[in-house]
Structures are given as structure tokens and as C-alpha cells.
Amino acid sequence: MNVTPLDFEKPILELEKKLDDFKRHLHGQEIDLDPEVRRIAAHLAKTKQQVYANLSSWDRVKIARHPQRPYALDYLRLCFGDFVELHGDRCFGDDKAMPGGLATLDGIRCAVVAHQKGRDVKENIKRNFGSAHPEGYRKSLRIMRLAEKFGLPVVALIDTPGAYPGVGAEERHIAEAIAVNLREMMILRTPIVAVVIGEGGSGGALGIGVADRVLMLENSYYSVISPEGAAAILWKNGAHRAAAAEALKLNATELAKYGLVDGVIPEPAGGAQHDHDATAKAFRTTVAGELRKLIGLPTDELLSARYRKFRAFGRFEEEAR
């Protein structure tokens, strides 16, 4: 798959093009220029290492939003088996931005709820750009309650810029739907693992993010507000989005350091868009491992640990002067 490069990847793209051109011109020539090819290849490898080792928070946001990054349905295809999609919230309708159903992961039967984006205009309209309506959150809760009833763990795949803020969503009580999910997930009597696979924006992400284990892919982000939104509020100018991304501490490494997420799933160099299969393998291994740890815990112990985990957020200490 030809991956569309991001702006910080342009030096890599130029070297790759130079190397390809060099090899093509050498085809059929009797001149031995292998040392020169090796030199360019070594320079390319070094450049890749330097670029990907020094990514800023804003660079990671751009990777998280890359249109060729694997989405929830890609993980369901690559990692899960026997997926049966369930439709409708039994109140209003079916939200295509939030698919869910029953599946197996590495032999473990489970329920899956997820955000889903589109790759082109037609699919983005169908999926509402990954921004769910109230019926999406109510459908996900219906699926999670079904999982609780049959003793199945829940896997939540988070990838949304935020819940849909339109008039229709407000009329159908989007805030109430998310709030109910927060409450009910806190007391759901079955293991829950949530994974931020791309964007984790505001309450739209948290609406399926109350879990025993919250994991993030290496180049995903999880934040109360987008960098553009924070820049517009704090600097009155969206051009400060890179500074806002740094200030928000929204990348996986920062959030793991502060204990706000429980683990980081590694991605191939440059992001998951460069190798869907390798990313899916790391996802399957990590998530299945966490599920196996949680399945064996007594339910009361599981709920107590989940409560303590979220109650501990937001604590701080003042340094004596």
C-alpha cells in the first residue's frame, strides 16, 4: 500500500525516491555502484530513525488522524473472528458511526463496541466522520449489558474527534446518553478493556472509555479537547495548535507516565498506517493478554479496582515553599 506521507516525512520520501531512481538507472548497467546504493540506504535508515525518534505531540496527532490508519472495522477483520454486528438502540435508530456486536479475540468470546470513521467522502457521510449520535452510545450500552448478561468481556475501540454536537443530537440528549454510559460502565459486572486506536476526543471518547484497562496505540491521542479547540480558546488563534498539543500532554507516553492510561501498544516506525498487519498483531497480543488477566478476577474485586482507578485521577500535591 502506498502511504500518503505527512509533512515531517518529506525528507524520508525524497531519499526513498532518490534511492529508487538510482536503482532504476543502474538496471542493466555494467558499472558497479553498489557502494553508493548502500550509502544512500544507510542515510535513509538514519534519517528515518532521527525523524521518528523526535516526533512532537502535534506530529502524533497528525499520525492519529492519518486517513490510511487502520480503523475499528479493520481491527475487527484482522484481529477478531466470528464478528456478528448488532444494530439499533431500541429507542431511535442505528448509528453507523458506532458499530458493535459479538466476536472472538484469540479464542476469547467477547462483545465489541467501537467508533468508525470513513476513508472517503461517501463513507465519512455514512459514518458521520466518527462522531456518534446519542443512539450510538445507547446502542453500545445495550451491547455491553448483553455482554454482562452472558458473562462476556467487553472490548471498546475508541477513535473519534468527539461526539456529534449537532441540533438533532442535542434534541435526543447526547450529554445524557454519555453520562448514563459513564455511570453504567463503572458498575458493569464484566471485564472491560478500552483501546484508543486513533483520536480520543473529549466525552465522545470517554463515553465508551470507562474500563478496567485503558490502552493506547503509540501514535494515538486522548484529550479533553482537540489541539485546535484549545488553541482557539487559550490563544484566540488556531495557528497555535502545536503548542496546545504539547501543553495538553495528550500523547500515549505522557498519559502513561501520569497513570491516566494503563499501557501503550507499539506501532511500526512512522505509524500504524505503514503496516496494518504488524499493528494488528501487537493489538491482538496485548488486548488478549489483558482480557485473560481480568477474566479470572472475582467480580467484586474487579469493580472495586475499577472504582479506585478512576477516583484516583486528578490528585495533585503542593510543594512546600
Image (spheres, helix red, strand yellow):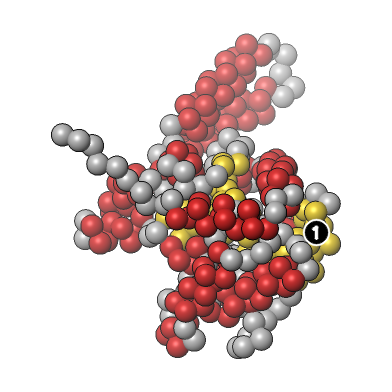
Determine the residue positioned at 67% across, 81% down. Answer: 88
Instruction: Name the residue furthest left.
Output: 321
Q: Which one is in front, 88 or 109? A: 109
Q: In which quarter of the image is residue 278?
A: top right
Determine the residue positioned at 47% across, 79% down. Answer: 176
Q: Which one is in front, 246 or 33? A: 246
Determine the residue positioned at 59% across, 53% down. Answer: 212
Q: Which one is in front, 142 or 216? A: 142
At label 1, the amino acid type is Arg
x and y percent of residue 225 in the render? 38, 60
Category of crowding for the residue at label 1, using alpha-carbon neighbours closer than 10 angstroms: few (below 14), some (14–19), many (at least 20): some
Quadrant assignment for the C terminus: top left
**Residue occupied by mark 1:** 109
Whether residue 250 is visible here, answered yes or no, is: yes
Looking at the rendered structure, the secondary structure element under dot 1 is strand
x and y percent of residue 179 in the render? 48, 73
Whether residue 159 is visible here, answered yes or no, is: no
Q: Quadrant of residue 233?
A: bottom left
**In this picture, is 55 found above or below 149?**
above
x and y percent of residue 45 in the render? 56, 24
x and y percent of residue 74 in the render? 70, 57
